[in-house]
Every structure is written in structure tokens, then in C-alpha cells.
Image (cartoon, rainbow, N blue to C red):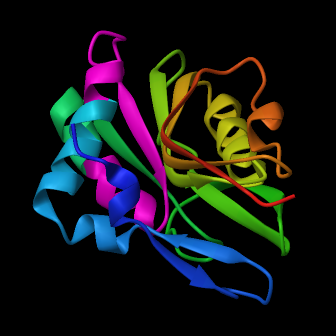
Amino acid sequence: MVKLIDFIRNVPDFPVKGVQFKDITTLCLEPIAFKDAIDRIVEEYKDKGIDKVAAIEARGYVFGSAIAYLLDAGFILIRKPGKLPYDKHCEEYELEYGTDSIEMHVDAVKEGEKVLLFDDLLATGGTAKAAIKLIEKAGGVVEGFAFVIELTGSLHGRDLLDGYEVFSLLEIPVEE
């Protein structure tokens, strides 16, 4: 098993001052690390009957599409506002540094389909919770949420996802 933390770049003061951004693009550059991360997530969910994998743009697409392919599942794009061309559901959420919203096509999930949600990082949990609401609004069943990185400590992102399975490859403490 690869030590994934060695492939994560820390970028201070991005996107705003005071945020220590965890950059996974460096992990994506290394085939052995990238493959290990995807394989570990697929191993966790391969026997859970996943119908669709939903990923949040943009870094989520890099991993989410490969995970969907390996799970023999469909792939759902969750995007920022104004990027999807058809009827959509929208959910607003709070970030550690502001507010934003995400959208998903209304027909992306069929009633009762099991969905694995994927995002690269769990911080406050706002984006993840909004994605859960999108899936459930469309009739899907959230089977779990997978992350490459979970920031632990003062942000309490996992608390917002109480009642849902959360699988993280890395837990990185945030300074209090």
C-alpha cells in the first residue's frame, strides 16, 4: 500500500488567506499513488451494489469516473451553477470561506438507485451534505461517501454527514 500523504501538496493561503489547501493534483501525477487511491475506494464498495457514482467537480471527476468504471456503475456529474444544460436540482451550502451551490440533472438518478458519492476532500461537510440532498431529492439512496482526504479537528465535516457511511483514505488534522 502506498503512503498517499507523501503525494499531497500543501498550498498556503489558497483560495483565501488562512486556508491550507490540500492539493491532490500531485497525487494524480504519480501512477502508483493514483492507482492505489482508486483501487482502495473500489475495494471498499465493490460488493455494495452501487448503481451510480456521483462526483463533485472538478477534482472529483478525475477519481469518480475511474471508480464508476471499475464498479460497473453509471457516472453522475455534480456541477457548479450554470454548467449543466438540462433541467436540474440545486442545493446551496456553506464553505469554510463563503457560500456556493451545486447542481445535478433531475434525471441523473432513478428512484431507489444506490449511489456512491465521491469528492476529493471533506472539510466542513457543506458540499457533501448538499450532494446528499441532490441525490435524495431525485429519489436515489446514498450508499456512502468516499474522500481522498478528510480534514479532522475543528471543521467537524463528518458530523454533518451523521447517519451516512464515510470512507476516507487520509485523515489530516487541522490546527485548532
Residue sticking out furthest to the left: 31
| Towards the viewer: 175 or 156 | 175
Residue 163 relative to residue 96: left or right: left
Residue in view at x 34 percent, y 12 percent: 49
The spot of residue 20 in percent (x, y) is: 67, 75
Mark yes or no: residue 136 visible: yes
Q: Position of residue 73 (x, y in %)?
A: 27, 31
Residue 140 picture quarter? top right
- Residue 91 % position (x, y): 77, 54
- Looking at the image, which is closer to me, 116 or 146? 146
Kindly identify the residue that appears in the image at 54 percent across and 25 percent down: 144
- The residue shown at (18%, 39%) is 69
Q: Quadrant of residue 82?
A: bottom right
- The magenta span reads 42-65
Residue 145 magenta-drawn? no
Kindly identify the residue that appears in the image at 27 percent across and 18 percent down.
Answer: 46
Task: Provide residue 25's location: percent of width, then percent of height.
Answer: 35, 73
- Horizontal side of 90 relative to 170 (left or right) equals right
Closest to the observer: 19 or 54?
A: 19
Let me know if residue 109 appears in the view. no
Residue 34, compared with residue 43, is above or below; it is below
- Indicate whether 86 appears above or below 158: below
> In this rendering, would 99 be left or right of 125?
right
Residue situated in front as seen by the camera: 124 or 172: 172
Position of residue 57 relative to residue 137, above or below, is below
Q: Quadrant of the C terminus?
A: bottom right
